[in-house]
Image (tube, rainbow, N blue to C red):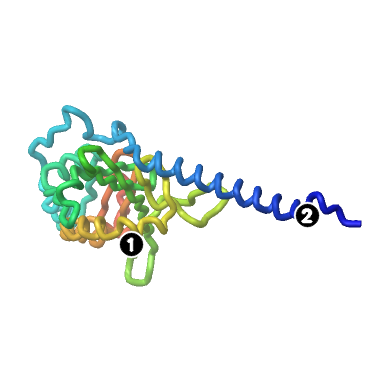
Amino acid sequence: MADKSNPKSGGGCLGKLMFLILLVAACGLGTAAYFIALPQDLSDIGGYGPNAQAPAGRDMAAVLKNSIDRGYPVTLTEIEINQWLGRTLVAKQGGLLADQVKLERVWIRLMDGVAEIVMVRSVMGKPFTVSMYLKVEQIQGLKGVETKLLMHGGPYLDNLPRPPRGGRFGQLVVPQGFLLLVMPSYQKLAELFSSEIHLGFEEMARIRIEKNRLVLDPREPSDDAAGLPQTF
């Protein structure tokens, strides 16, 4: 004979399970929102700090064009790139939130094989950061070296190639798909420096992103018979 004292025990367990899942999801979203609201630490970036005023320096477009015309590699340090950005970038934020949201600065962090482009905004007086990872892939084709800029920083998890790391919202590392939310801002930034991007990434035959520096070489690999690299 069925026990009528607890007729809905199965439904009660299912309800508790659903409540537990929703509770874990809510905690996860709350934790993610907390780390998104925290701006990432920029103190390790070359040129950042209270004394990081942008002194007069080289014209980046002229340096790159000179490298291509003369056929010599050029090395740009992280400090030099960030100081140049500080001198040349006119930061503007339009739209309905123009009074509350302001683009303060753009920083470049160079790591082994990966560059991180960090945008610092001021939201109602508080700093907020978003960033995008970039990798360079070069393939030797029939017409020479083909260069591709990949908008990710490698796998999100070591054992899983997908999804790749796209960037960071605050201190939270996000998958590549989340970059759709900030892509318009980065497209506008790229338009401001279309000449430098063309010279630095479309005209150069070899590109290396290393820790704290970017090495650009206009010579095809077969042209480097002398062995030792030259920089200026």
- Assign the C terminus to one quadrant of the image: top left
Label 1 neighbourhood size at 10 Å, few (<14), some (14-19), many (20+)? Answer: some
Q: 8 or 82: which is nearer to us?
A: 8
Secondary structure type for disc 2:
loop
Relative to 14, residue 57 above or below: above
- Residue 37 position, x and y percent, is 34, 40
Q: Residue at x 37, y 53 (%)?
A: 135
Query: CA gap, disc 2 to disc 1?
Result: 67 Å
Q: What kind of residue is marked 2?
A: Pro
Q: What kind of residue is marked 1?
A: Thr
* Residue picked out by circle 1: 147
| Quarter of the rendering containing residue 182 | bottom left
* Residue picked out by circle 2: 7
Q: Which residue is drawn at 11% across and 43% down?
A: 87
Residue farthest toward the front in the current orientation of the protein: 4
Q: Is residue 16 left or right of residue 105?
A: right
| Quarter of the rendering containing residue 57 | top left
Q: In this view, does 27 lie to the left or right of 59?
A: right
